Image (cartoon, rainbow, N blue to C red):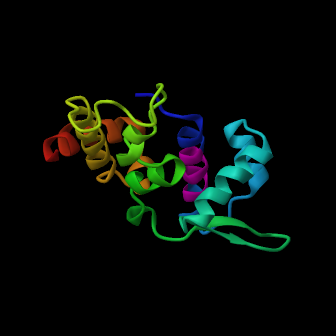
Amino acid sequence: MKITSQEEYGLRCLLQVAQLTVKNELASLEGIAKAEHMTTDYAAKLLSILRNANLIESVRGKSGGYKLSRLPSEIKLDEVIKVLSGELFEVNSCEQFPGNDDKCVHIDCCSIRSVWFSVSHILFALLKQVTLEDLLKKEDLLSKYLKKELILNL
């Protein structure tokens, strides 16, 4: 599985907003772009996606910026990833077959499709258990948590 740049940087932008929100501060577009070493245009695109999904709010004005629309403990990674890229395995992906036909010849009898659905289900079950609050913790604490708590709950 490959994590797209939109997923990676979108989540990183959201974390920048979360870090400042918990301090009752607003995150600026320029500050986020600089912190993540990306263009302001790309950061603006990602923040727009996150804002349209009601994960963040924008505050207008000279001292405006971005803040989370909910507590970090209420925003789960499965929601963030779905907003940034959709499902891992789309239900109708078999109908968008790149071969010579309009849809895959195995659409009615596919043994592979169940594997991809299972992988998607397992991944999103894991992501559903991780919140932005978890990601704000130190990495070593999070990795211990993931190993002990999340894997056992799948």
Q: Position of residue 128 (x, y in %)?
A: 31, 53
Answer above or below: position of 124 versus 4: below
Query: Residue at horizontal 33%, vertical 30%?
Result: 105
Among the 4 quarters of the image, the one containing residue 52: bottom right
Judge left or right: residue 20 versus residue 133.
right
Q: Nearer the viewer, residue 133 or 117?
A: 117
Residue 88 in view? no
Residue 11 on image: x %, y %: 53, 47
126 shown above or below 29: above
Q: Residue at x 71, y 51 (%)?
A: 45
Q: Residue furthest front?
A: 101
The single residue placed furthest to the right in the displayed view is 62
Question: In the rendered picture of this protein, how many numbered marks are placed on residues?
Answer: 0
Percent coordinates x, y for residue 39 in the rendering: 78, 40
Magenta segment: does it hold 46?
A: no
Bounds of the magenta span?
A: 10-18
For the residue pair 129 and 49, the one nearer the viewer reads as: 49
Q: Nearer the viewer, residue 87 or 9?
A: 87
- x then y, percent, for residue 99: 46, 25
Residue at the outermost top position: 99
